[in-house]
Image (tube, rainbow, N blue to C red):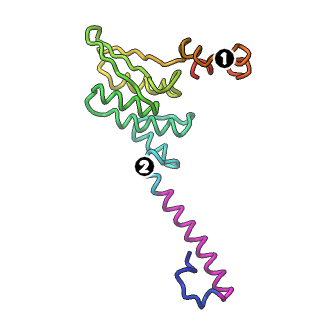
């Protein structure tokens, strides 16, 4: 790196080559430190400052994976503002990393959240439910609809029971194939 910027006369001097090697290592260490510091300024890349972001969002989630913690913080920040169907959809998608369909049911004062690209229940569904409860108007009810493998879809695989047994999966795992 640094050696390429110097005159070629230094390329034969062992002392200078050793100095360049040490400086290259130090420069790379400095670049990594700057990059890591920059990552801490954004929720989606923070690691060391994740607790500060949680405090800012009013959350405390120490015992869950960092990706879910980040997702919860981002969703909490997105949760501010007027609650609309697109707002709730955006919030749900940030939690599940998948598509949802929101169906309003004004006659019964409720709405339905249907997960259409994630089979089974999303991994951090309880966190999503908590955020939805916090932002939705109190007079509205909410139902959640999950996508599972139907018998028709399962039959289309043309598996025999022996082939299913060979997959060595639990029923819960088979439901979301």
**Element type at mark 1:** loop
**Residue furthest bottom as drawn:** 9
Q: How many marks?
A: 2
Q: Residue at x 38, y 22 (%)?
A: 133
Tell me the distance, in whole angstroms, between the alpha carbons under discs 2 and 1. 47 Å
Image location of residue 46, percent across then percent down = 48, 48
Image location of residue 4, percent across then percent down = 55, 80
Image location of residue 57, percent across then percent down = 40, 38
Q: Residue at x 58, y 71 (%)?
A: 26
User: Which quarter of the rendering shows the N terminus?
Assistant: bottom right
Q: Residue at x 43, y 40 (%)?
A: 55
Residue topped by disc 2: 42
Residue 22 higher or lower than 117, as above or below: below
Query: Dot 1: within a 10 Å radius of its alpha carbon, few (fewer than 14), some, or many (20 or more) residues?
Result: few
Query: Which label's residue is closer to the chain start, 2 or 1?
Result: 2
Question: Magenta part of the protein: which range?
Answer: 12-37
Q: Is residue 14 left or right of residue 33?
A: right
Q: In this view of the protein, which residue sits in the foreground, 137 or 162?
A: 162
- Report the mark closest to the observer, 2 or 1: 1
Q: Residue at x 28, y 27 (%)?
A: 83
Q: Please tell me in which quadrant of the rendered image residue 100 appears.
A: top left
Q: In this view of the protein, which residue sits in the foreground, 151 or 80?
A: 151
Residue topped by disc 1: 159
**Residue furthest top as drawn:** 108
């Amino acid at each position: 790196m640094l050696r390429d910027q110097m005159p070629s006369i230094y390329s034969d001097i062992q002392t200078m080559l050793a100095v360049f090697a040490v400086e290259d290592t130090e420069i790379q260490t400095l670049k990594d430190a700057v990059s890591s510091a920059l990552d801490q300024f954004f929720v989606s890349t923070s690691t060391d400052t994740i607790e500060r972001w949680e405090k800012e969002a009013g959350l405390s989630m120490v015992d869950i994976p960092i990706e879910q913690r980040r997702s919860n913080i981002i969703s909490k920040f997105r949760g501010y503002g007027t609650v609309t169907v697109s707002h709730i959809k955006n919030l749900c998608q940030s939690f599940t990393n998948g598509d949802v369909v929101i169906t309003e049911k004004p006659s019964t004062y409720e709405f339905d959240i249907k997960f259409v690209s994630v089979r089974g229940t999303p991994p951090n569904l309880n966190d999503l439910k908590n955020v939805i409860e916090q932002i939705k108007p109190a007079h509205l009810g909410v139902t959640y609809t999950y996508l599972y493998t139907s018998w028709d879809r399962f039959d289309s695989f043309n598996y025999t029971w022996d082939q299913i047994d060979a997959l060595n999966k639990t029923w819960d795992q088979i439901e979301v194939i």
